[in-house]
Structures are given as structure tokens and as C-alpha cells.
Image (spheres, rainbow, N blue to C red):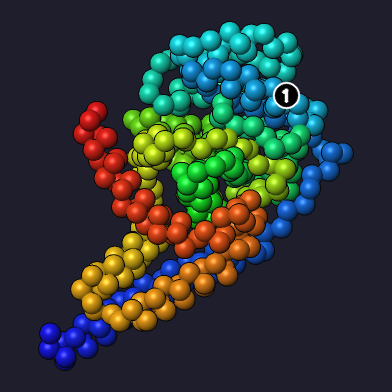
């Protein structure tokens, strides 16, 4: 290879790498600054306790729905009801719930059998007697007895709050799939919490989500995206959010834990449902999220081909990668600590590479999955 062309190629590659690294660093600084000023105080049991309607939609949840409702009914909060709505289960979950004797528990059966759970949720919301609605899934368990009070505290902290975004981490178990599932959850939360904190909310997650019934009714519920089976959390929150009406709850007493998927294809199947609504995000959010993922993908692809074709000397690309990892680890330690992921901190280099592979595989899986339908 001509020495002049080699030097030109190496210079161009280095410029692109530094550009991509600068973009990645900008996002991490943004995330760090967003979380840095987020302070959480433990809820005071004596605080004003407005009525809360907790809604759990379930389908073929088996005995797990019993454990979820049982844990919710043990909450240290004096003014709440639990609406458990069966979305056409074919197992014994509904019968198991009937054995529970608690006046706060309302059992419902959905009337419309449609893909997704929007129809069932809409029916439950109509029956809710309180304006404050708190949602979780049938496989989630609160970490303690202050889940409701912690979320309510954020709702009533300021007069204009109508949405509270909570955190739903995965239970720690063995295996790399569990580690990666937890890591991917933290990375996702790190993003949408940071966007919300800076007034650019684009999603919430139904495992731990609170909003007002009056807000739901004012935007006509799920009407604008009824054609999609998903979107009952992210698209609804994006539509109903403003710069001032969203709060983030990171009090560890509010965390709702669930088990990660146990097989790679189950994990991809779950995540492909989640990204099916991303085309409905605003142009700004699609652009910012796309740049974040593309910059990381581009960084590793260029490093990979530089190694294969010998465009960069080994000491150069190793130094760049190590510098990238160290910078990100410094800025994310505080975030990982808040999100109960400190045990993943020193695994970050490997998990970072796995995340890029995941970014490449998931769209392909989603495409083939749609064709299979």
C-alpha cells in the first residue's frame, strides 16, 4: 500500500473515531448531569395520602399474579384500591385470584379481546374511582412496603405533575443473559429518565408508571394509536407529557422488580415488541436516539475493520478503546449505583460490546418476525 494513501486513510479513520467518541461522550455527560441533581427523599408515612387506583392487567400469569397482588395489598398506604383485570386468560390465574379476600381488590374481566392490552386497560381505567392511577405488570414485585407512597410523593411534590416515571429493574440471577438484560434495562432507563429530567419525555414503562386519569381522558386515551398492539406506555406518555408535568422517581423504595427472560429468543421477542412503536416517536426523539445508537455502532465497526485491514496500529486502537471505556465508566458509576447495577460496573467493557451487537441484531430479528406474521 502506498505510504501516502495509508497515512491519509489512517488520518481519516482517526478523525471519524474522534468525532464518534465526542458524540458518545456528549451523551454520557448529559446523562451524568441529569442524574447528578436528582435527589430522592424517603416518603413520610404521615404525608397526605390521596386515593390511588392500582391497575394490573394480566393474561396467563398463573400463580405469579397472586404473588404480585399479594405484595401490592401489603403496601403501607391507607387509601388505595387494586384493579386486576383478566385479559382473556386461558389458565387458572383468574380462579387463583378469587381466593383472595380483600375489600380493596376489584376483579375484572376484559370485554374486548384485542391484541395488546389497551382495551383491557381502558376498561379498568374507566372503573377506577381515583384520579391517580398506578400501573404495574403481573410479574412485578415491589421491593418493600413504600412503593405507592414513594410514587405518590413525586406526584404531589409539585402542583403541575401529572406523570411519574418509576423504575423496574430485573432480579439478579446467574448467567450472562441475566447480566445483559439488567445492563440493557439500565441503559434504557438512563436514557429515558435523562430525557424526562431535561423536559423531553418520550416514554415510560408499564412495569412502574403513574399518571392521572384526568390526563388520560384529556388526550382521549389510546385513541391515536389503537392500530398498534403496543404503545400503552411509551406513546401515551409521549403524547401526554409536557416540559413541566413529568417527574422521575428514583427512590429505591419505589423499585418494582421482575425476572428477566431466560432465553435469548424470548428476550429478543420482548424487545422487538417494545421497538415496534419507535416509528411513532417525534422526529427529534428518533434523531437523538438514532444518533446515540449509531455512534456506538459506528465506533466499533470502524475499530473492527481497522484491525482486519491494518489501518491502525495496535497501540492506537487499544488506547482509543480503553480511553472510551474509562471515560464512560467514570461518568456512569453514579448512575449505575442509583439504578442498582454496581455489580455490572466492572463488566462494562464486555457488556458495551454486547450492547452494540444487540443494536445490530434486534432490528433484523424484528424485521424477520414481522414477515413471519
Q: Is residue 199 above or below residue 281?
A: below
Q: Is residue 128 above or below residue 300?
A: above
Q: Quadrant of residue 20?
A: bottom left
Horizontal placement of 103 versus 28: left or right? right
From where the camera sits, is residue 32 visible?
yes
Q: Is residue 218 left or right of residue 105?
A: left
> Looking at the image, which residue is at 58% across and 22% down?
64
Q: Position of residue 341 (x, y in %)?
A: 60, 53
* 27 to 227, vertically: above or below: below
According to the picture, the residue beneath numbered tag 1 turns out to be 73
* Picture residue at 45% right of the left edge, 26% below the top: 118
* Direction left: furthest residue: 2
Percent x, y of residue 323: 47, 76
Badge 1: residue crowd in 10 Å (few <14, some 14–19, many ≥20): some
| Front-lying residue, 158 or 35 | 35
* Residue 47: percent from left, percent from top: 83, 40
Q: Residue furthest bottom?
A: 4
Image quadrant for the C terminus? Answer: top left
Q: Secondary structure at mark 1?
A: helix
Quadrant of the image containing the N terminus: bottom left
Residue 208 in sight: no
Residue 354: image location, x then y, percent: 40, 54
Q: In this image, 97 relative to 262: left or right?
A: right
- At 43% from the left edge and 15% from the top edge, which residue is drawn? 112
Q: Residue at image x 40%, y 16%?
A: 113
Looking at this view, is 97 or 313 the one in front? 313
Amino acid at each position: 500500500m502506498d505510504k501516502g494513501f495509508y497515512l491519509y486513510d489512517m488520518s481519516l479513520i482517526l478523525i471519524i473515531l474522534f468525532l464518534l467518541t465526542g458524540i458518545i461522550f456528549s451523551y454520557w455527560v448529559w446523562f451524568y448531569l441529569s442524574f447528578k441533581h436528582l435527589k430522592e427523599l424517603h416518603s413520610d408515612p404521615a404525608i397526605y395520602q390521596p386515593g390511588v387506583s392500582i391497575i394490573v392487567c394480566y393474561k396467563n400469569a398463573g400463580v405469579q399474579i397472586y404473588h404480585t397482588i399479594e405484595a401490592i395489598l401489603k403496601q403501607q398506604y391507607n387509601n388505595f384500591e387494586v384493579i386486576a383485570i383478566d385479559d382473556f386468560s386461558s389458565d387458572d390465574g383468574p380462579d387463583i385470584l378469587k381466593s383472595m379476600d380483600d375489600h380493596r381488590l376489584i376483579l375484572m374481566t376484559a370485554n374486548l379481546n384485542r391484541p395488546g392490552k389497551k382495551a383491557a386497560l381502558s376498561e379498568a381505567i374507566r372503573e377506577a374511582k381515583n384520579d391517580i392511577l398506578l400501573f404495574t405488570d403481573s410479574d412485578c414485585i415491589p421491593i418493600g412496603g413504600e412503593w405507592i407512597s414513594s410514587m405518590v410523593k413525586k406526584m404531589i411534590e409539585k402542583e403541575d405533575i401529572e406523570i411519574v416515571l418509576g423504575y423496574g429493574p430485573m432480579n439478579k440471577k446467574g448467567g450472562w443473559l441475566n447480566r445483559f438484560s439488567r445492563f440493557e434495562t439500565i441503559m434504557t432507563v438512563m436514557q429515558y429518565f435523562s430525557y424526562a429530567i431535561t423536559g423531553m419525555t418520550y416514554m415510560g414503562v408499564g412495569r412502574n408508571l403513574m399518571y392521572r386519569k384526568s390526563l388520560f381522558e384529556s388526550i382521549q386515551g389510546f385513541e391515536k394509536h389503537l392500530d398498534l398492539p403496543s404503545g400503552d406506555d411509551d406513546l401515551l406518555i409521549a403524547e401526554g407529557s409536557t416540559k413541566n408535568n413529568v417527574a422521575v422517581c428514583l427512590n429505591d423504595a419505589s423499585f418494582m422488580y421482575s425476572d428477566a427472560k431466560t432465553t435469548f429468543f424470548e428476550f429478543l421477542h420482548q424487545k422487538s415488541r417494545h421497538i415496534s412503536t419507535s416509528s411513532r416517536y417525534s422526529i427529534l426523539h428518533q434523531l437523538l436516539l438514532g444518533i446515540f445508537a449509531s455512534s456506538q455502532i459506528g465506533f466499533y465497526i470502524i475499530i473492527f475493520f481497522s484491525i482486519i485491514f491494518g489501518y491502525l496500529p495496535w497501540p492506537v486502537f487499544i488506547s482509543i478503546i480503553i480511553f472510551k471505556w474509562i471515560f464512560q465508566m467514570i461518568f456512569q458509576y453514579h448512575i449505575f449505583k442509583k439504578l442498582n447495577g454496581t455489580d455490572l460496573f466492572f463488566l462494562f467493557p464486555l457488556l458495551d460490546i454486547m450492547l452494540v451487537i444487540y443494536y445490530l441484531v434486534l432490528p433484523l430479528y424484528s424485521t424477520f418476525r414481522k414477515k413471519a406474521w
